[in-house]
Image (cartoon, rainbow, N blue to C red):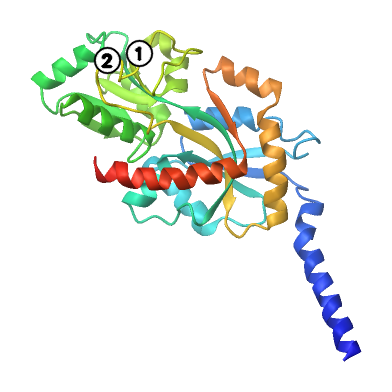
Amino acid sequence: MKRMLIGAAAALALSFTAAQAPAADYPDRPVSLVVVYSPGGATDFQARIVTMMAGEEKYLGQPMVIINKPGAGGKVGWNQYASGAKTDGYELASYNVPHFIAQSIKFETKYNIDNLEPIANWGADPAVFVVNKDSPFNTMADAVKWAKDNPGKLTVSGAGLYVGHHIAFLQIQKGTGVEMKYVPHKGGAPALKSVLGGQVMAGVNNLSDAYRSRDNLKILGIADLERDKEFLPDVPTFKEQGYDVDDSSVNFRGIMVRKGTPQPIIDLLAAKVPEMFKNARVAKQMKAGGSPMRIMTREQVQTMWKNRQVFLKELLAGL
């Protein structure tokens, strides 16, 4: 019996050591970060900034390498990630909310809030309604009047289906009471290019993308509860203009791993990544790129995901 107890204790100690081991030398090589949107779009642009300090010893001591897997508003990349990514802590992914939650509600996806684990949130990017600088529309009222006179002919680009852009579009269409035509793209960058190039008459895009192209655009409204005083103080909210559009489409961005990743690795990332986001160089470059930051811890993101899941089920049922 004594020999059995000693053996059991040794096995328990060994299993405990094995469970803790991954964090001891993790990471010992570069870490990949999947971005499910096109290079140059807001998520890609911001991901490259917020991860640029990862190689410093006080953070991860290893660089983060961005891997773009765009398609179907994020569904292609997230489906691949949720079903095939390794759970060793070397394959991370960026998330976008409401995007991946709304898609998991509306479509049969391989991803949802139950098989992904948040690490930390770096930003919150409202949707804006934009037109080319040569457009005859100078206000949302101009665009709405034209759309009323020409039902279904006002073409509006966005970064896919049931992403923040699409949710904002649906709310704008409902709030204005006019029929418009939504034109989905593979990401924010191509969606904005179609506005700049005149392929569509208008677009719903991220504040950050629009801000960087503001010299070639007119930004007619922001889908948030308040104006953005830092980047677009002169752009009114839709509510200010009399249209019932709230902040449901605000795009939260952060980093996540697949469920099944060892807890010691999750704990290490959850401790280091938010501090990396707070780096002064990161904040400076994000501000220069018109990218609003909202840093949230793993626990705060877990709560946000759960709340948004409940909220989006109700919202999407009514749109």
Location of residue 80 in the rendering, given as x and y in whole percent from the top left corner: 48, 53
The tag on residue 312 is none
At a point 86% along the width and 76% down the height, the residue shown is: 10
Q: Could you say which quadrant of the image residue 260 lies in?
A: bottom right
Separation of residues labelled 2 and 1 (CA atoms): 7 Å
Q: Tell me the element at label 1.
A: loop
The tag on residue 241 is 2
At a point 21% along the width and 16% down the height, the residue shown is: 143
CB-based contact (under 8 Å), mark 2 and mark 1: yes
Location of residue 70 in the rendering, given as x and y in whole percent from the top left corner: 44, 41
What count of labels does the image hold?
2
The quadrant of the image that shows the N terminus is bottom right
19 to 73, vertically: above or below: below
84 to 174, vertically: above or below: below
The foreground one among 51 and 220 is 220
Q: Residue furthest left?
A: 149
Location of residue 35 in the rendering, given as x and y in whole percent from the top left corner: 52, 40
Q: Could you say which quadrant of the image residue 139 lies in?
A: top left
The foreground one among 215 and 307 is 307
Q: Residue furthest bottom?
A: 1
The tag on residue 236 is 1
Q: Could you say which quadrant of the image residue 47 lies in?
A: top right
Location of residue 78 in the rendering, given as x and y in whole percent from the top left corner: 47, 49
Q: Residues within 10 Å of mark 1 (few under 14, many from 20)?
A: many
The quadrant of the image that shows the C terminus is top left
Q: Residues within 10 Å of mark 2 (few under 14, many from 20)?
A: some
Amino acid, disc 2: Gln
At a point 24% along the width and 18% down the height, the residue shown is: 242
Q: Tell me the element at label 2.
A: loop
N-terminal-most mark, 2 or 1: 1
* Residue 176 seen by the camera: yes
Amino acid, disc 1: Pro
